[in-house]
Image (tube, rainbow, N blue to C red):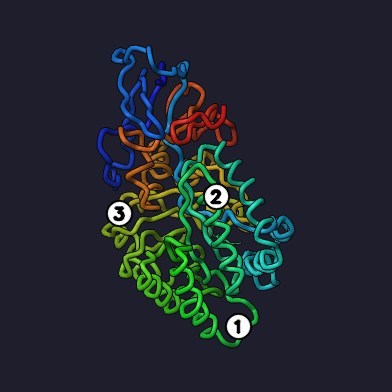
């Protein structure tokens, strides 16, 4: 039994639908509340005046702090072998993301290191990162492959993710991103790499249940629209919906193709035209924004989030945690940047990072809001003077306690 909760944010009695347009700014809350947990579930909550008798319950006095559902981070590359701080310096010296990739840095650099690292060590490193994320309020996470880029190394990565699923106290979804970058040995024969992904890896992955989604980096110098379409269709044939990387630097028609393929989400979207926004406004495909990536790259492309919201798109926020473009999975900072640089309102940012993040991982039945029957994954912050204080306090640690599966995980 939790007593004296200052405010429960993002609360609901029934599962809320996706919030589009002006509704995205609606964040239902309940002040001065209690909440009852049983096992790993939320049973009920209500005004403190209606708090049940305390006998028979173990009581946790929240002391007026605020309560939020855990962040649902639907886009990450958490499994990697090594950080890439040299590229950070290259960028300071003036090289672009594409120039660094062409020099053999970037994704190919990460792939080389991952191929060389034993599976157990990869797993151990990923576990450390995941534990750190739990303290930052992340209560569900999607993780991609895509730093393997060979038959063996992609499977190794996906097996690490599978092991994380079994070990972690939070739900994890796995995404097969073999089409992240073209390995140099296939430079003269792109078709052979596509065949490796589609004819050899995909059947094996499906057979072993190693992925929930399929992804492709549709971008100049990476994978073309036609290749992206082939990947999405192949995934579909094996029951893997698409969540794709597109419109990070260039608009290539991937959004319309993804919608047509029934993709769960299109991610990045720093570059968007009016037609694409309109299409997303009418689509079930979610629009996942990753504002820390262009921030870290000091890239001028910024998602026109206001126009996207006005067009009616279902907007998600995620971290993109990866060694190249966002070496951080701090979702509270993602929310701050969404407010500062994309002009999203604090309520919109929280909706996008919780409820919509859960939808983007097909976890909305369990997570994303505080609701009777939902999994009890949430965090407590210091008592906030208002919701805006959370994204306003960028870089500060306002999270003081984390509950996962109904148990106090950390305080
Ligand atoms: O989401 N854009 C493609 N993939 C990652 C970056 C990967 C890397 O640079 O290692 C991203 O930003
Ligand atoms: Fe990414």
Q: Which residue is mark 1?
A: 186
Is 262 located above or below residue 365 in the figure?
below
- The front one of 89 and 185 is 185
Q: Is residue 289 left or right of residue 299?
A: left
Q: Which residue is mark 2?
A: 292
Residue at the limit of the structure toward the bottom, as seen here? 188
Tell me the residue at 47%/66% (across/down): 208
SS at circle 1: helix
State the CA–CA distance, disc 3 to disc 2.
23 Å
Tell me the residue at 69%/69% (across/down): 112
Instruction: Name the front one of labels 2 and 1.
Output: 1
SS at circle 3: loop
Quick check: is the Cβ at mark 2 less than 8 Å away from ligand 1? no
Q: Quadrant of residue 368?
A: top left
Q: Is residue 211 left or right of residue 279?
A: right
Q: Is residue 346 visible?
A: yes
Q: Which residue is mark 3?
A: 311
State the CA–CA distance, disc 2 to disc 1.
31 Å
Q: Earlier in the sequence, mark 3 or mark 1?
A: 1
The image position of residue 343, as x and y in percent, is 44, 44
The image position of residue 143, as x and y in percent, is 51, 55
Is 352 located above or below residue 110 in the figure?
above
- Whether pointer 3 and pointer 2 mark residues with C-beta atoms closer than 8 Å, the reply is no
State the CA–CA distance, disc 3 to disc 1.
40 Å
Q: Is residue 37 left or right of residue 341?
A: left
SS at circle 2: helix
Quick check: is the Cβ at mark 1 less than 8 Å away from ligand 1? no
């Amino acid at each position: 039994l939790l007593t004296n909760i200052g405010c429960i944010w993002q609360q609901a009695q029934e599962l809320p639908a996706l919030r589009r347009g002006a509704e995205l700014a609606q964040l239902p809350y309940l002040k001065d509340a209690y909440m009852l947990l049983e096992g790993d579930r939320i049973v009920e909550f209500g005004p403190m005046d209606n708090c049940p008798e305390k006998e028979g319950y173990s009581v946790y006095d929240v002391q007026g702090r605020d309560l939020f559902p855990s962040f649902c981070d639907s886009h990450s590359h958490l499994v990697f072998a090594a950080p890439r701080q040299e590229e950070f310096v290259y960028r300071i010296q003036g090289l672009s993301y594409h120039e660094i990739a062409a020099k053999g840095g970037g994704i190919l650099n990460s792939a080389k290191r991952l191929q060389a690292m034993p599976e157990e060590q990869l797993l151990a490193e990923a576990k450390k990162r995941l534990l750190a994320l739990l303290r930052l309020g992340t209560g569900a996470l999607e993780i991609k492959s895509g730093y393997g880029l060979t038959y063996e190394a992609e499977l190794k990565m996906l097996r690490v993710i599978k092991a994380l699923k079994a070990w972690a106290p939070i739900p994890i979804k796995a995404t097969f991103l073999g089409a992240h970058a073209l390995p140099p040995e296939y430079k003269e024969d792109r078709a052979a790499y596509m065949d490796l992904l589609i004819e050899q890896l995909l059947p094996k992955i499906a057979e072993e249940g190693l992925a929930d989604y399929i992804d492709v980096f549709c971008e100049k110098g990476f994978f073309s629209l036609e290749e992206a379409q082939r990947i999405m269709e192949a995934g579909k044939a094996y029951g893997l919906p698409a969540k794709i990387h597109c419109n990070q630097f260039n608009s290539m028609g991937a959004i319309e193709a993804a919608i047509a393929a029934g993709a769960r989400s299109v991610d990045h979207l720093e570059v968007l035209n009016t037609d694409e926004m309109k299409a997303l406004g009418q689509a079930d495909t979610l629009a996942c924004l990753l504002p820390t990536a262009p921030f870290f790259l000091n890239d001028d492309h910024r998602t026109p989030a206001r126009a996207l919201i006005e067009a009616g798109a279902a907007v998600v926020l995620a971290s993109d945690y990866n060694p190249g473009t966002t070496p951080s999975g701090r979702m509270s900072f993602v929310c701050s940047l969404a407010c500062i640089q994309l002009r999203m309102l604090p309520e919109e940012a929280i909706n996008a990072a919780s409820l919509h993040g859960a939808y983007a991982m097909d976890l909305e039945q369990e997570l994303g809001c505080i609701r009777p029957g939902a999994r009890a994954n949430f965090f407590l912050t210091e008592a906030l003077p208002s919701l805006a204080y959370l994204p306003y306090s960028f870089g500060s640690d306002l999270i003081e306690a984390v509950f996962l599966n109904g148990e106090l995980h950390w305080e």
